[in-house]
Image (spheres, rainbow, N blue to C red):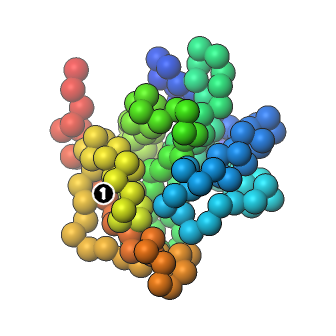
Amino acid sequence: MAEWIEPRTARLQLRQWRDSDRVPFAAMNADPQVMEYFPALLSRAESDAGIDRQIAHIEQHGWGFWALERREDRAFLGFVGIKQVADNLPFAPAVEIGWRLGVPFWGCGYATEAAATSLRVAFEQLGLDEVVSFTALPNVRSRAVMERLGMQRDPATFEHPLVPQGSGLRTHCLYRLSRIDWRGNITG
């Protein structure tokens, strides 16, 4: 088991998952707004399995898609973090940055803030050369976060192998950020 990294910002704590996260995470994954750019809503069992995968990744590597908590009131907001991409993606092996927050927490800058600290872990603590992110083409909100982070869109798109043929969500865009470009974006 690796030593866990649990980054924090002035407002947010990224941490290992707890059993108390299961109910609010399942509610998020059953919310049509949150899951608009995913092929389907998730059942409670599917949501719990997702948490179990994230716990295992963090236990193995010390980092992953962390549960996201607001520090002032310990509210569970969703998840943000970095993890290895699935081997069946055309740009594997790679480490991706991703996020999913409950609707009440949209528009507060939490995803960008937590993702920025996740990039710091990726580049400063882990010494990664590049981080990627991807989403269905119509997901302009997530693409805007990627762009705020300084990520550049790859000119090629790809068909996500887990999204059914014929779905308008199958075609994905890929964004990339190198450690060198990330250093150039740091201010202050």
Q: Residue furthest top?
A: 72
Q: Which residue lies furthest to the front in this view?
A: 32
At which x and y percent is residue 35?
Answer: 56, 56
In terms of secondary structure, where does tag 1 sit? Answer: strand
Which residue is drawn at the image coordinates 65% and 31% (left, top)?
A: 76
Q: On the rendered structure, is 92 left or right of 47?
A: left
Residue sitting nearer the eye, 28 or 145: 28
Which residue is drawn at the image coordinates 61% and 28% (left, top)?
A: 69
At which x and y percent is residue 66?
Answer: 60, 41
Which residue is drawn at the image coordinates 41% and 61% (left, top)?
A: 135
Q: Which residue lies furthest to the bottom in this view?
A: 165
Determine which quarter of the picture holds residue 188. top left
Identity, as a three-letter code, of the amino acid under mark 1:
Arg
Q: On the rendered structure, is 180 left or right of 145?
A: left
Q: Which residue lies furthest to the left in this view?
A: 184
Whether residue 158 appears in this view of the structure is yes
At which x and y percent is residue 30?
Answer: 68, 53
Which residue is drawn at the image coordinates 42% and 78% (left, top)?
A: 159
Determine which quarter of the picture holds residue 46. bottom right
Residue under circle 1?
A: 176
Q: Residues within 10 Å of mark 1 (few under 14, many from 20)?
A: some
Determine which quarter of the picture holds residue 75. top right
At which x and y percent is residue 105?
Answer: 52, 32
Q: On the rendered structure, is 140 left or right of 180?
A: right
Q: How many marks?
A: 1
| Above/below status of 185 relative to 46 | above
Whether residue 68 appears in this view of the structure is no
